[in-house]
Image (cartoon, helix red, strand yellow):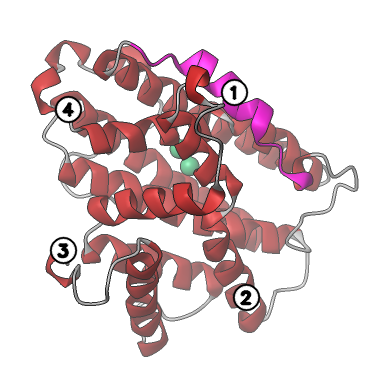
Amino acid sequence: MPEGKVYPQGWDPDDVDWAKFDASKVEPWLLTAIKAAALVEFNAPDYVTYLKRVFKDAGPETLADIEQWGREESQHGRVLGRWAEMADPGFKLDTTFARFHKGYRPAHFANPNDVSVRGSRRGEMVARCVVESGTSSYYSAIKDTTDEPVLKEIAGRIAADEFRHYKLFFETLHKQDEPELPVWKKLLIAAGRITESDDDELCYAYYCATVPADREAATPYLRASFAKAGYNTTLRIYRRRHIRKLTQMVAKAAGVDPHGRLTKLAEALLWRMLKFRAGLSGVGAEAAS
Ligand SMILES: [Fe+2]
Ligand SMILES: [Fe+2]
């Protein structure tokens, strides 16, 4: 669970104390990251459609859980977008999201075969646990790094939701009437999902958050440069302890001891990979840990 105040499940955007917003505490580099996160979160309905196809035979309870999960992710997008609109009145969530949604359509959303791109329902849940490990640690890190009071509150509320999502998908993983996956296969799926973090979803969200529509022609989308910018921002947000928590959660989902040597090695590798992809030397960012 996130450190400090624990927020309840089932909160509403109106529960946020928006009046505490302090424009002088907004940091431009973090604002860009929040805009990008809002776009990805707001895309939840496409994931709901895909997951409901994959889990169509898993029973009404699981389908209801998927729908509730999607509502909460969409709310994250709406709330982050509202904060970004306060911090930058030139930013509009709905129009920016329309651009993002038009430009980002992964193949598996259109896959008509009702089969997970991870090969099985259990595989799909391992991948979802990886994503929720990433988001819970990401918003925990944002809560820890920002001094803007409203963003701090929002990040705390969202992080609490993301920890609950991890728990939901972890339980759903073990509920499936499919053969248990071997640990090596779960590790492969987890590693694959982690390395997908530089696919078009995050990079294109970062592009839409950075480049306004009227500058698209002058600044065309180049995945590599926006991936690097995204990793740079991510490295500024994370501390080593957040990467540790993330790695431990992924290890648990893969059936590996979260406190064992393999997990510690994976934590060190992930931290190095993040610095490498951000374009920093291995030594330069050690002070951030
Ligand atoms: Fe979320
Ligand atoms: Fe989530």
The residue wearing badge 1 is: 99
Which region is colored magenta? 90-107
Query: x, y percentage for residue 285?
Result: 20, 67
State the SS at label 3.
Answer: helix
Mark 3 or 2 closer to N-term?
A: 2
Question: The disc labelled 2 sits on which kind of residue?
Answer: Leu
The residue wearing badge 4 is: 26
Question: The disc labelled 3 sits on which kind of residue?
Answer: Ala
The residue wearing badge 2 is: 188
Mark 2 or 1 closer to N-term?
A: 1
Location of residue 26 (image quadrant): top left
State the SS at label 1.
Answer: helix
The residue wearing badge 3 is: 288
Closer to the camera, 116 or 163? 116
Question: The disc labelled 4 sits on which kind of residue?
Answer: Val
Residue 68, compared with residue 288, is above or below; it is above
Residue 139 shown left or right of residue 116 in the figure? left
